[in-house]
Image (cartoon, rainbow, N blue to C red):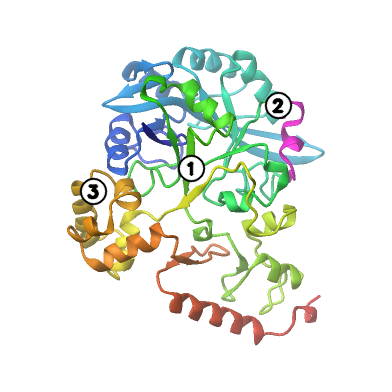
Amino acid sequence: MQIIADLHIHSKYARATSKEMDLEHLSTYSKIKGINLLGTGDCTHPSWFSEIKKKLKERRDGIYDYNQTNFIITGEIRTIYKKNDKLRKVDHLILVPNIEVCEQMNDSLKNLGNLRLDGRASFYKSAPEIVEKIIEISKDIMIIPAHIWTSWYGVLGEFSDFNKIDECYEDQTKHIHALETGLSSDPMMNWRLSSLDKFTLVSNSDSHSPWPWRLGREVNVFEINDEKFSYKEIVDAIKKKDRRRFLFTIECNPEYGKYHFDGHRKCNVSLSPKEAIKNNNICPVCGKKLTIGVLHRVELLADREEGFVPKDAIPFKTLLPLYEIISHALKVNQLYSKKVIEEQDKLIKHFKNEFNVLLNVDKEELMKVTDEVIVDAIMKVRNNEVKVIPGYDGVYGKPVFSESEFNKFEENRRKVLRRQSKLGDYS
């Protein structure tokens, strides 16, 4: 049985989250997307945990059911503390074996902070202290550093200022078996650091909305015997990087992110990390310091060239949401227009769910249901033939379906750089 799992989401009790992030809507929209295992998210929040206990029915060994949607108990916690006179903020995804263990964990954690303030509980304790505290409750709890390259709250992010995982977790690194790539990175970026090889890379949406274009933006795909489908089987596949059970992850292209490349929005300047480093991180237009992107941070820590793949790495696929593919194919500026919704709903109704359309249905079958231009766009995404104009300094990246359009952008970008004074003039 193939399991498509999104293990990091948030509930309606988290800040800046849709009021529809409840079990009812999550169940409905996970079916539309094609997700058959969800994390509950926010398991430390008392009100949400109360709903979980009341509405979820245990199917088998840590797998819970609500309206024919499978759930495991998950949450996210934030540690905020000082180390070497520097403030550190690190987020952690936690997977919990069952409701009973979660109740024990919450009873222990409530003495360290107010669990009601947010779906994501925050503690003014160090990451190693929190890991040790949680593992004391149960060694079956899995702790995964969340969205590890996010500038503010990722363990390897610019402002956390850790260069290696064990610099953060110290002697508790022995309990860290996996890392979450987050929307700001993909496995290819992480494979450039040999120090990360011992960790399994997982991918989740960190969704704050149940709608299919948010839920399942990134997922993990497992092959699990139905008779063995359990919390332990999922966690064991992650820990062991078992490619028989952990098939691949599905990723968003990190170039869509608002801070992938370096640059200056006001100056219309974007630079790759190598270009920025060559120019001393100074804007060639205004002579001020560039806004540094996530890829630059990877470049600084990498000890391998781009394109390196470790021998035991879990593969990945890069996809776009179906609505976005349709909008670009039909040249509709408003991504979620009536026309786009109609085409998307038609495809999903015919082929059961979005992931099935994006990954599995033959081109000939798609042609029977929708326009050729949409089918061609789906095939380009499936075959990884879509390039992205990288985001920078708060500007989102943009997918490009034609080689000529991307080449035109790249030519214009380089023209801007060439016609400015050399960076040395500002150093």
| Residue 348 tag number | 3
Residue 74 visible here: yes
Report the span colored magenta.
161-173
State left or right for residue 315 relative to residue 345.
Answer: right
Disc 1 crowd, CA 10 A, few/some/many (<14, 14-19, 20+):
many
Compared with residue 361, is residue 1 higher up or lower down, i.e. above or below? above
Single out the mark in the foreground, 1 or 3. Answer: 1
Disc 2 element = helix
Q: Quick check: marks 2 and 1 in contact, CB under 8 Å?
A: no
Q: CA distance from mark 2 to mark 3?
A: 43 Å
Q: Nearer the viewer, residue 63 or 161?
A: 63
The x and y percentages for residue 423 are 75, 78
Percent of width and height locating residue 415: 60, 84
Q: Amino acid at mark 2?
A: Lys
Q: Kindly report which numbered mark, 2 or 1, lies closer to the viewer in this rendering.
A: 1
> What residue would you read off at disc 1?
248
Badge 2 or badge 3: first in the primary sequence: 2
Kindly identify the residue that appears in the image at 44 percent across and 65 percent down: 385
**Which residue ends up furthest to the bottom in the rendered image?**
419
Q: In terms of secondary structure, what is the magenta stretch mainly?
A: helix
Q: Are marks 1 and 3 in contact (CB under 8 Å)?
A: no
Q: Position of residue 129 (x, y in %)?
A: 70, 24
Mark 2 or 1, nearer chain start: 2
Which amino acid is tagged 3?
Ile
Q: Which residue matches tag 2?
A: 174
